[in-house]
């Protein structure tokens, strides 16, 4: 499984529109093969900062959704309401005994 983190910085006067579009995007994502779960968070200290966290069965299924025209259409609408480009980061779950630091410890 992978976890996808998407950070977006919204223009202050567009928060309601961004929230509406994020709900629409999640509704579409929930119908996609490989979607497991998701949540949308808004920073307490910086209300312009939104974080969407979603879990997918694998990175390939996330990438397939990321390229779908339906997602691109909604994402383009959201992009017009942002003060900076969105930042997408995909994480995988660490395995026990997996990654080690340069000093041999995890």
Image (tube, helix red, strand yellow):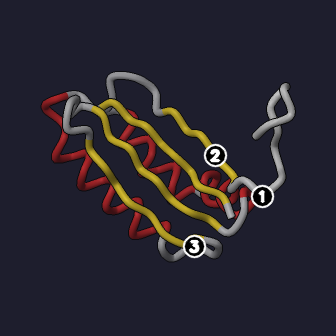
Return the x and y of residue 92 as percentages of the image width and height.
69, 53
- Mark 3 / mark 1, whichever is N-terminal: 3
Identify the disc placed on residue 32.
3
Residue visible at 21% across and 46% down in the picture: 17
| In the foreground, 30 or 77 | 30
* Quadrant in the picture for residue 84: top left
Identify the disc placed on residue 12.
none
Q: The C terminus appears in which quarter of the rendering?
A: top right
Front: mark 3 or 2: 2
Q: Residues within 10 Å of mark 3 (few under 14, many from 20)?
A: some
| In the foreground, 10 or 5 | 5
The span from disc 2 to disc 1 (Cα, nearest Å) is 19 Å
Q: Residues within 10 Å of mark 2 (few under 14, many from 20)?
A: some
Identify the disc placed on residue 90.
2
Mark 3, secondary structure of its residue:
loop
On screen, residue 45 above or below 67: above
On screen, residue 85 above or below 2: above
Residue visible at 48% across and 73% down in the picture: 30
Q: Residues within 10 Å of mark 1 (few under 14, many from 20)?
A: few
On screen, residue 98 above or below 34: above
Return the x and y of residue 94 as percentages of the image width and height.
72, 53
Mark 1, secondary structure of its residue:
loop
Identify the disc placed on residue 96.
1
Q: The N terminus appears in which quarter of the rendering?
A: bottom right
- Mark 2 / mark 1, whichever is N-terminal: 2
- Mark 3 / mark 2, whichever is N-terminal: 3
The span from disc 3 to disc 1 (Cα, nearest Å) is 30 Å
Front: mark 2 or 1: 1
Residue visible at 32% across and 41% down in the picture: 50
Front: mark 3 or 1: 1
């Amino acid at each position: 499984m992978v976890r996808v983190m998407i950070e977006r910085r919204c223009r202050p006067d567009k928060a309601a529109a961004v929230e509406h579009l994020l709900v629409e995007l999640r509704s579409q994502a929930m119908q996609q093969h490989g979607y497991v779960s998701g949540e949308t968070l808004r920073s307490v200290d910086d209300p312009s900062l939104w974080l969407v966290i979603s879990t997918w069965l694998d990175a390939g299924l996330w990438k397939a959704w990321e390229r779908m025209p339906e997602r691109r259409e909604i994402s383009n609408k959201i992009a017009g309401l942002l003060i900076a480009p969105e930042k997408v980061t995909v994480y995988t779950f660490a395995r026990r005994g997996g990654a080690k630091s340069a000093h041999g410890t995890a």
